[in-house]
Amino acid sequence: MPSKIRIQRINDRIRQDLSELLVMGKISDPRLLGVTVTDVKVDRELTYADIYVSAVEGHERAKEVLAGFESASGLIRHTLAESLQLRNFPRLRFHWDPTPEKADRIEALLKQIHEERGKQKSV
Protein backbone atom coordinates (compact mmCIF):
# COMPACT_ATOMS: atom_id res chain seq x y z
CA MET A 1 0.00 0.00 0.00
CA PRO A 2 1.25 3.48 -0.79
CA SER A 3 2.14 5.91 1.97
CA LYS A 4 -0.08 8.82 2.99
CA ILE A 5 2.31 11.22 1.27
CA ARG A 6 2.12 9.26 -2.00
CA ILE A 7 -1.70 9.13 -1.78
CA GLN A 8 -1.77 12.91 -1.26
CA ARG A 9 0.49 13.43 -4.28
CA ILE A 10 -1.80 11.27 -6.40
CA ASN A 11 -4.84 13.21 -5.14
CA ASP A 12 -3.20 16.53 -5.99
CA ARG A 13 -2.04 15.34 -9.39
CA ILE A 14 -5.47 14.01 -10.39
CA ARG A 15 -7.11 17.26 -9.25
CA GLN A 16 -4.58 19.37 -11.14
CA ASP A 17 -4.69 17.32 -14.34
CA LEU A 18 -8.49 17.10 -14.39
CA SER A 19 -8.74 20.85 -13.79
CA GLU A 20 -6.41 21.43 -16.73
CA LEU A 21 -8.53 19.16 -18.93
CA LEU A 22 -11.59 21.22 -18.06
CA VAL A 23 -9.94 24.62 -18.49
CA MET A 24 -8.22 23.72 -21.76
CA GLY A 25 -11.51 22.42 -23.20
CA LYS A 26 -10.19 18.92 -23.87
CA ILE A 27 -13.49 17.54 -22.64
CA SER A 28 -16.03 18.84 -25.13
CA ASP A 29 -19.17 18.23 -23.07
CA PRO A 30 -21.02 21.58 -22.68
CA ARG A 31 -22.45 20.38 -19.35
CA LEU A 32 -18.96 20.68 -17.86
CA LEU A 33 -18.40 24.36 -18.65
CA GLY A 34 -17.67 26.44 -15.57
CA VAL A 35 -17.07 23.41 -13.35
CA THR A 36 -14.42 23.38 -10.63
CA VAL A 37 -12.74 20.33 -9.15
CA THR A 38 -12.73 21.03 -5.42
CA ASP A 39 -11.18 17.85 -4.05
CA VAL A 40 -9.96 14.36 -4.91
CA LYS A 41 -9.68 11.47 -2.48
CA VAL A 42 -8.09 8.22 -3.59
CA ASP A 43 -8.53 5.22 -1.30
CA ARG A 44 -5.48 3.44 0.12
CA GLU A 45 -5.79 0.52 -2.31
CA LEU A 46 -5.93 2.89 -5.30
CA THR A 47 -9.23 1.28 -6.34
CA TYR A 48 -11.41 4.38 -6.39
CA ALA A 49 -10.87 8.10 -6.79
CA ASP A 50 -13.71 10.16 -5.36
CA ILE A 51 -13.78 13.46 -7.23
CA TYR A 52 -15.71 16.38 -5.77
CA VAL A 53 -16.91 19.07 -8.16
CA SER A 54 -18.83 22.32 -7.97
CA ALA A 55 -20.14 25.00 -10.32
CA VAL A 56 -20.70 28.73 -9.98
CA GLU A 57 -24.42 28.37 -10.60
CA GLY A 58 -24.78 26.15 -7.58
CA HIS A 59 -26.81 23.08 -6.79
CA GLU A 60 -29.22 23.69 -9.69
CA ARG A 61 -26.63 22.23 -12.06
CA ALA A 62 -25.62 19.29 -9.88
CA LYS A 63 -27.48 16.57 -11.81
CA GLU A 64 -26.44 17.99 -15.16
CA VAL A 65 -22.77 18.27 -14.19
CA LEU A 66 -22.62 14.80 -12.63
CA ALA A 67 -24.28 13.32 -15.73
CA GLY A 68 -21.67 15.05 -17.88
CA PHE A 69 -18.85 13.60 -15.83
CA GLU A 70 -20.37 10.11 -15.89
CA SER A 71 -20.63 10.19 -19.68
CA ALA A 72 -17.05 11.44 -20.03
CA SER A 73 -15.56 9.26 -17.28
CA GLY A 74 -13.98 6.77 -19.71
CA LEU A 75 -12.17 9.52 -21.61
CA ILE A 76 -11.17 11.26 -18.39
CA ARG A 77 -9.85 8.06 -16.83
CA HIS A 78 -7.89 7.16 -19.96
CA THR A 79 -6.35 10.63 -20.24
CA LEU A 80 -5.43 10.79 -16.56
CA ALA A 81 -3.99 7.26 -16.63
CA GLU A 82 -1.62 8.26 -19.44
CA SER A 83 -0.23 11.17 -17.45
CA LEU A 84 0.01 9.51 -14.01
CA GLN A 85 1.72 6.24 -14.87
CA LEU A 86 0.15 4.06 -12.16
CA ARG A 87 0.09 0.28 -12.50
CA ASN A 88 -3.68 0.27 -11.96
CA PHE A 89 -5.52 3.53 -12.31
CA PRO A 90 -8.43 4.00 -9.89
CA ARG A 91 -12.04 4.05 -11.07
CA LEU A 92 -13.53 7.53 -10.95
CA ARG A 93 -16.58 8.41 -8.86
CA PHE A 94 -17.96 11.93 -9.10
CA HIS A 95 -19.73 13.75 -6.27
CA TRP A 96 -21.27 17.21 -5.93
CA ASP A 97 -19.47 19.41 -3.38
CA PRO A 98 -21.84 21.83 -1.62
CA THR A 99 -19.00 23.55 0.28
CA PRO A 100 -18.73 26.66 -1.98
CA GLU A 101 -22.49 27.21 -1.74
CA LYS A 102 -22.37 26.88 2.04
CA ALA A 103 -19.47 29.33 2.21
CA ASP A 104 -21.44 31.87 0.16
CA ARG A 105 -24.41 31.46 2.50
CA ILE A 106 -22.21 31.99 5.57
CA GLU A 107 -20.65 35.10 4.02
CA ALA A 108 -24.11 36.51 3.26
CA LEU A 109 -25.23 35.89 6.84
CA LEU A 110 -22.10 37.52 8.27
CA LYS A 111 -22.61 40.53 6.00
CA GLN A 112 -26.22 40.80 7.14
CA ILE A 113 -25.17 40.67 10.82
CA HIS A 114 -22.51 43.31 10.21
CA GLU A 115 -25.05 45.60 8.51
CA GLU A 116 -27.58 45.12 11.34
CA ARG A 117 -24.95 45.98 13.96
CA GLY A 118 -24.01 49.09 11.99
CA LYS A 119 -27.64 50.21 11.99
CA GLN A 120 -27.98 49.59 15.73
CA LYS A 121 -24.91 51.72 16.53
CA SER A 122 -26.20 54.63 14.47
CA VAL A 123 -29.58 54.66 16.27
Image: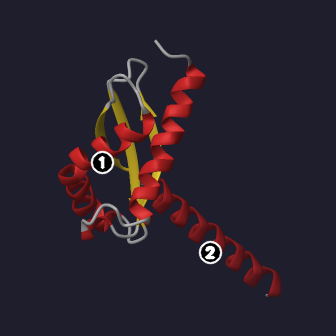
| Quadrant position of residue 30 | bottom left
Q: What element carries label 1?
A: helix
Q: Comparing marks 1 and 2, which lies closer to the viewer?
A: 1
Asked whether 110 or 56 is in front, the reply is: 56
Answer above or below: position of 58 versus 39: below
Locate residue 82, reporting x and y percent.
36, 39
Answer above or below: position of 79 versus 67: above
Q: What residue appears at the point 31 percent right and 64 percent down from the top-left corner?
A: 32
Locate residue 26, reporting x and y percent.
34, 62
Locate residue 25, reporting x and y percent.
36, 67
| Quadrant position of residue 123 | bottom right
The residue that label 2 is drawn on is 112
Relative to 46, 113 lies left or right: right
Q: What residue appears at the point 55 percent right and 60 percent down from the top-left corner?
A: 103
Relative to 47, 64 lies left or right: left
The residue that label 1 is drawn on is 76
Answer above or below: position of 103 versus 97: below
Distance from disc 1 to disc 2, alpha carbons, whole Å, reads 42 Å
Relative to 46, 30 lies left or right: left
Q: What residue appears at the point 29 percent right and 42 percent down from the top-left corner?
A: 77
Hey, what amino acid is under mark 2? Gln
Asked if disc 1 and disc 2 are in contact, CB closer than 8 Å, the reply is: no
Q: What residue appears at the point 45 percent right and 42 percent down from the top-left corner?
A: 14
- Sort mark 2 into few (<14), some (14-19) or many (20+) by Cα contacts within 10 Å: few
Residue reaching furthest to the bottom = 123
Residue reaching furthest to the top = 1
Asked whether 56 or 11 is in front, the reply is: 11
Hey, what amino acid is under mark 1? Ile
Q: What element carries label 2?
A: helix
- Sort mark 1 into few (<14), some (14-19) or many (20+) by Cα contacts within 10 Å: some
